[in-house]
Image (tube, rainbow, N blue to C red):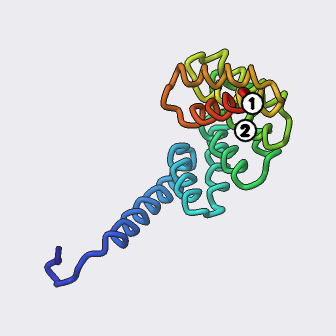
Amino acid sequence: VITIDGKVPNPKNEHDEDKKKAENAFLTAVENDSDLVDAWLILGQNAMAENDPLAKRYYQNAITAEPENVSALHSLAFYLQNNEDVLGAQKLYRKIHILDKNYLKANLNSGLLYIEQDSLEKAYEQFNIITQNNPGNHVGYYYRGVVHELQGNLENALTDYQNSMNIKPDYEKAVTATAALEKALKK
């Protein structure tokens, strides 16, 4: 495609321009009304995608606007989790648990952090909360199985991996873990 002025458009540049216009529109919006939580969250998500440290500030602004907004709290916690601030992330996940016991994404991420910290009992508790509150959550069973396996409870791990596959037969992580564990148990 050639434009009227004879130039070949560069889709990347057009996308970048549109993205910059959208970002400027959100910045103008929050400048006019700093309580626009969704705008702060979108700015944070876009900044995080670009590895821009401004993401943290945007998420903090969303929380300032609405301190009990679990989406804002989770966004900042996830940012902190991905930027090596495990304690800060865990603190926010605990706050989310207090505000909304049914917000299971916080349990999942908190459990993953506990695995990284070798706090397997605490990790198990988080994944168990997921399976108790949402028995159809295949991810909760899978990660509970991971904890069992790390603890050496191979039969329990296999049961949880199979429960995960019963819910979602094509969940690759559970399929792979089940096959590996069945092979190990046959030895």
Residue to which mark 2 is pinned: 112
Circle 2 packing at 10 Å, graded few (<14), some (14-19), many (20+), is many
Q: Position of residue 78 (x, y in %)?
A: 66, 45
Q: Position of residue 172 (x, y in %)?
A: 54, 36
Circle 1 packing at 10 Å, graded few (<14), some (14-19), many (20+), is few
User: Measuring 54% from the left and 19% from the top, which residue is drawn there?
Assistant: 166
- Looking at the image, residue 154 sits to the left or right of residue 33; the answer is right
User: Measuring 69% from the left and 52% from the top, which residue is drawn there?
Assistant: 82
- Looking at the image, residue 149 sits to the left or right of residue 69; the answer is right
- Looking at the image, residue 2 sits to the left or right of residue 38; the answer is left
- Is residue 113 something that shows in the picture? yes
Proximity of marks 1 and 2: CB atoms separated by less than 8 Å: no
Q: Position of residue 70 (x, y in %)?
A: 63, 34
Q: What whole-number distance in Å separates the C-alpha atoms at marks 1 and 2?
A: 29 Å
As drawn, the label of residue 187 is 1
- Looking at the image, residue 69 sits to the left or right of residue 14; the answer is right
Q: Amino acid at mark 1?
A: Lys
Q: Amino acid at mark 2?
A: Leu
Q: Nearer the viewer, residue 155 or 128?
A: 155
Hey, which residue is sitting farthest front in the picture?
A: 187
